[in-house]
Image: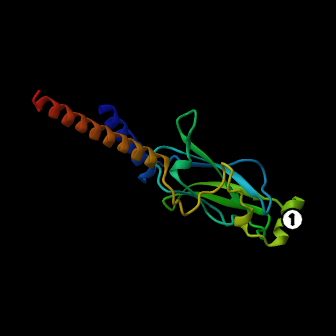
Amino acid sequence: MILARTAVAATAAATLALSSPGSGSGDSTLEHEGGGAQRGRETVFTVTTGEGHGSLTVESEAFAKKLTLRAKRFRTGKDGELYTRVAGMVLCDVEPGTYPVELKEDDETVDIAELVVTSDMDPGNRDFCASHTSYDDAVDKTSETAPDTEDDGGVGLGELAAVIAGTAALSAVLASAATYLVTRRRRREPK
């Protein structure tokens, strides 16, 4: 019983810590992976942050849309910092050049990286840009770098663990109460 309460409390505390917006850790960073980016192709960034970060987004005028980063996508690195990788789709009609990519925490810019969009295009990217296919159709939604969707909709792992632990604790309490009542009734019955 005590173990079940401890598990529920620990799960609730972990869920609260990961889901509640912080006041801003100020140590969030953004780093571009690789060299120049081609139009009509995704380019990957690594976001590193500390505990208690607020709502994080990665934004650039060169991207098809802003990238929203949810707490559940971050992993703990070797140095204890939280990190994730995210890919932004570079627009087909953007001019080659250098563009700022901003990491924003609660709508305030905390870091800026540079994105160099090259004039070179692979034949596949050229075909994609000429086909007028939707960016949403071209984005790889299955990779680890896929952007988070705005509609989360589902139950998170922490919430599911809390429900399971709560159900187990309730079952244990009900079983204990039933056992007590049956044992008490047997002692009172005449022999």
Image height check: is 1 above or below 107?
Answer: above
How many numbered marks, from 0 up?
Answer: 1
Question: What percent of the width, then of the height, locates residue 141?
Answer: 68, 56
Q: Quadrant of the N terminus?
A: top left
Q: Is residue 158 visible?
A: yes
Q: Residue at x 44, y 44 (%)?
A: 161
User: Observer-nearest residue: 144 or 113?
Assistant: 144
Question: What percent of the width, then of the height, locates residue 140?
Answer: 71, 56
Image height check: is 51 above or below 67?
Answer: above
Specify the quadrant of the image occupied by residue 109. Answer: bottom right
Q: Residue at x 38, y 41 (%)?
A: 165
Question: What percent of the width, then of the height, locates residue 148?
Answer: 59, 57
Image height check: is 46 above or below 180?
Answer: below
Q: Is residue 41 left or right of residue 124?
A: left
Amino acid on which the number 1 mark rests in the picture: Arg
SS for dot 1: helix
Q: Residue at x 43, y 49 (%)?
A: 159
Specify the quadrant of the image occupied by residue 116. Answer: bottom right
User: Observer-nearest residue: 177 or 113?
Assistant: 177
Q: Quadrant of the C terminus?
A: top left
Q: Is residue 52 visible?
A: no
Q: Is residue 126 left or right of residue 109?
A: right
Q: Is residue 30 left or right of residue 129?
A: left
- Count neighbours of disc 1 (C-alpha within 10 A) and say few if under 14, some if 14 to 19, many if 20 or more: some
Extreme top residue here? 191
User: Observer-nearest residue: 34 or 125?
Assistant: 125
Extreme front residue here? 191
Q: Residue at x 9, y 30 (%)?
A: 190
Question: What percent of the width, then of the height, locates residue 26?
Answer: 49, 49
Extreme right residue here? 123
Q: Which colour scheme appears in the figure?
A: rainbow
Find disc 1 in the rendering and name its residue.
Answer: 126
